């Protein structure tokens, strides 16, 4: 992130004679365990969006030890599942960069090495892998995989401008599993505004037909090469995954990433080739390992079973892996102080960065972060984008490392931490223009949805783009917005980078010697007890109290059947 470095069936026929019910039941059980005659069972284990969360996180126990997640628990579950099925595929759907102090200290190298030791077969290239430019990604891969031991996959990257990455990244691969040739191809989301891939080109930005065409060509190539099962290892997000499953013939399974979805059941989509495509995703941050088992036969795949295996306190961490994690933590403490062993605050409830299903509004974590920025700078208002908040906070005791993970994006060269704080001035008219510019992404991307402090506004997603803000609803403090007045705004430097992309004009931009992390950490310490929640700072008009026309919201952050 160059601008930010210095400052995101078949039915059976009716039998001719009566078959005893007990025999039918026994045959059904046998099919579940043995699979379809002539088919082989393929097991896929998967994670996605791990974001350098090598250690367990909260809720924390009395000793401030995390009780959920961690790569050592993932290693335990993968080893257990591989013991039951040694041929199981292990896949990672991308975004191992950014999100935790482990990344800021070690740039992904230990995570990649630990994933290789755990037996990962392939990794998709995520958007965050390019946050610090292709040079940093190439350096990490060269150090972690000097002999390209684990392939990274993406079929929509043009690496000709940075060919060194070609030694590590391929469009696809074929792996034999239980006698079945499994083709796997990767895809990378093309339209993330903050990744910095240049001179690598991420193909398909703004043109889904190009993206789906590249996927279709890769599937055709894999089938021609003998692949009997085709898996898309996708870092595209659910909307793209669904479109791919519905449009591209011949895809049996989509292992998805990017939007951190926890799919408790596979989404089954009718594929244009006449079969069914299964879409799966395991959340994020090593909270689960996904397990999918299918029968693979001449007529495609049939779902046998599926589970998200929780990496909770009931799973013992693999000792040899946890020992490496503890050693890495010592290096982090030596550089940034006691970020693990001291309670800095306590949360009464989980503080989420997301919203209730179907409603976009101010989030608890967004309110906490923007309050911290406004109070630290004394600005009239503070603004951030939901996509620049990494995650929320768990209930219970919190340590400094928990706070860092909420605002972990960016890399500051001086401190090795994240984004800095900035301020600027903006007129009321231009502020409304900025709100409209971000509301244009409703139903397309959550990342641009704003979080605010010191202001309130309402919007109508059914209005045309550019006319969604209810002007009379906008309040700065307790006063109605004046279009001609100038207001001071506190943001992080990621927002400063976005302003020209959105066509928003501001003045008097000041980059402050304050890290966003420090501003939020100081605010949390001052509050001591956290009880942040959605307050109605941002409201969808149809959700306001009173009589309104009935309609389905256009904004559904989790558009699943």
Image (cartoon, rainbow, N blue to C red):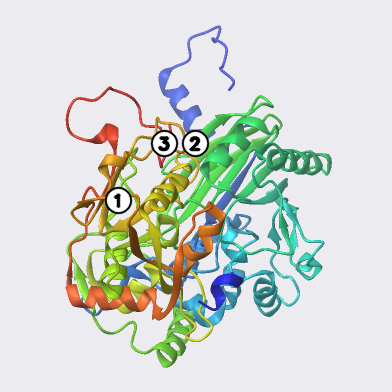
Q: Quadrant of the N terminus?
A: bottom right
Asked whether residue 65 is in view, the answer is: no
Q: Nearer the viewer, residue 128 or 517?
A: 517
Q: Residue 559's image quarter?
A: top left
Q: Secondary structure at mark 3?
A: loop
Tell me if I can see residue 472 in this picture. Answer: yes
Seen in the picture, residue 242 relative to 496 is either above or below; the reply is above
Pointer 1: what residue?
A: 482
Between tags 2 and 3, which lies in front? 3
On the image, the x and y values in percent for residue 173 come to 75, 53
**Would you name the residue on which mark 2 appears?**
267
Specify which label sits upstream in the sequence, 1 or 2: 2
Q: Residue at x 50, y 71 (%)?
A: 410
Does label 2 or label 3 sit earlier along the sequence?
Answer: 2
Q: Quadrant of the C terminus?
A: top left
Viewer-nearest of discs 1 and 2: 1
| Residue 130 percent coordinates (x, y) | 62, 65
Residue 34 placement: quadrant: top right
- Image position of 149 (left or right of 372): right
Between 183 and 136, the one lying in front of the other is 136
Task: Measure how far apart labels 1 and 3 are at the Cα level.
Answer: 17 Å
Q: Nearer the viewer, mark 1 or mark 3?
A: 1
The residue under the point 40% across, 30% down is 462
Q: Is residue 283 above or below residue 226?
A: below
Q: In whole angstroms, how far apart are the C-alphas of marks 2 and 3? A: 35 Å
Q: Residues within 10 Å of mark 1 (few under 14, many from 20)?
A: some
Q: Specify the label residue 465 is tagged with.
A: none
Mark 1 or 3 closer to N-term?
Answer: 3
The tag on residue 467 is 3
Q: Mark 2–mark 3 contact, CB under 8 Å?
A: no
Residue visible at 54% across and 36% down in the picture: 303
């Amino acid at each position: 992130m160059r601008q930010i470095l210095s400052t995101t069936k078949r039915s059976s026929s009716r039998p001719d004679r009566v078959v005893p019910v007990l025999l039918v039941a026994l045959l059904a059980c046998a099919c579940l365990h043995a699979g379809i005659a002539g088919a082989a069972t393929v097991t896929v284990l998967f994670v996605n969006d791990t974001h350098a969360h090598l250690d367990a996180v909260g809720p924390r126990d009395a000793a401030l030890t995390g009780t959920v997640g961690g790569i050592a628990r993932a290693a335990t579950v993968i080893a257990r599942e591989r013991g039951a099925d040694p041929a199981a595929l292990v896949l990672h759907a991308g975004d191992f960069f950014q999100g935790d102090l482990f990344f800021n200290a070690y740039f992904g190298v230990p995570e990649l090495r630990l994933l290789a030791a755990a037996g990962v077969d392939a990794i998709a290239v995520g958007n965050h892998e390019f946050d610090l430019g292709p040079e940093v990604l190439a350096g990490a891969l060269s150090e972690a995989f000097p002999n390209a031991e684990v392939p990274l996959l993406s079929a929509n990257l043009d690496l000709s401008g940075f060919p060194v990455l070609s030694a590590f990244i391929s469009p696809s691969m074929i792996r034999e599993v239980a006698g079945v040739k499994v083709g796997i191809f990767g895809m990378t989301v093309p339209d993330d505004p903050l990744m910095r891939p240049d001179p690598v080109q991420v193909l398909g930005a703004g043109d889904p037909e190009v993206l789906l065409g590249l996927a279709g060509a890769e599937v055709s190539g894999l089938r021609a090469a003998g692949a009997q099962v085709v898996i898309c290892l996708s870092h595209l997000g659910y909307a793209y995954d669904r479109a791919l499953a519905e449009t591209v013939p011949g895809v049996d399974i989509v292992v998805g990433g990017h939007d951190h979805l926890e799919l408790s059941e596979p989404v089954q989509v009718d594929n244009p080739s006449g079969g069914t495509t299964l879409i799966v995703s395991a959340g994020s941050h090593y909270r689960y390992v996904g397990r999918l088992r299918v029968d693979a036969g001449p007529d495609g795949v049939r779902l046998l079973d599926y589970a998200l295996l929780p990496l909770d306190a009931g799973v013992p961490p693999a000792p040899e892996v946890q020992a490496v994690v503890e050693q890495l933590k010592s290096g982090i403490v030596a550089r940034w102080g006691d970020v693990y062993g001291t309670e800095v605050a306590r949360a009464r409830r989980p503080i989420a960065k997301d919203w209730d299903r179907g409603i976009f509004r101010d989030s608890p974590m967004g309110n906490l972060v923007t309050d911290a920025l406004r109070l630290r700078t004394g600005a009239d208002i503070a603004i951030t984008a939901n996509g620049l908040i990494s995650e929320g906070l768990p209930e219970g005791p919190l340590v400094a490392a928990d706070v860092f993970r909420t605002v972990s994006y960016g890399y500051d060269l001086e401190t090795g931490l994240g984004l800095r704080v900035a301020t600027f001035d903006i007129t009321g008219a231009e502020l409304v223009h900025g709100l409209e510019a971000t509301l244009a992404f409703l139903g397309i991307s959550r990342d641009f949805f704003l979080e605010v402090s010191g202001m309130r506004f309402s919007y109508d997603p059914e209005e045309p783009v550019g006319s969604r803000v209810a002007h009379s609803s906008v309040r700065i403090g307790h006063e109605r917005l004046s279009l001609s007045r100038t207001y001071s705004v506190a943001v992080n430097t990621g927002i400063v980078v976005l302003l020209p992309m959105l066509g928003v004009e501001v003045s008097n931009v000041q980059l402050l010697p304050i890290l966003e992390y420090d501003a939020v950490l100081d605010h949390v310490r001052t509050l001591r007890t956290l009880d942040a929640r959605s307050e109605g700072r941002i409201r969808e008009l149809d959700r306001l109290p009173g009589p309104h026309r009935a309609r389905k919201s256009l904004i559904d952050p989790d558009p699943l059947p």
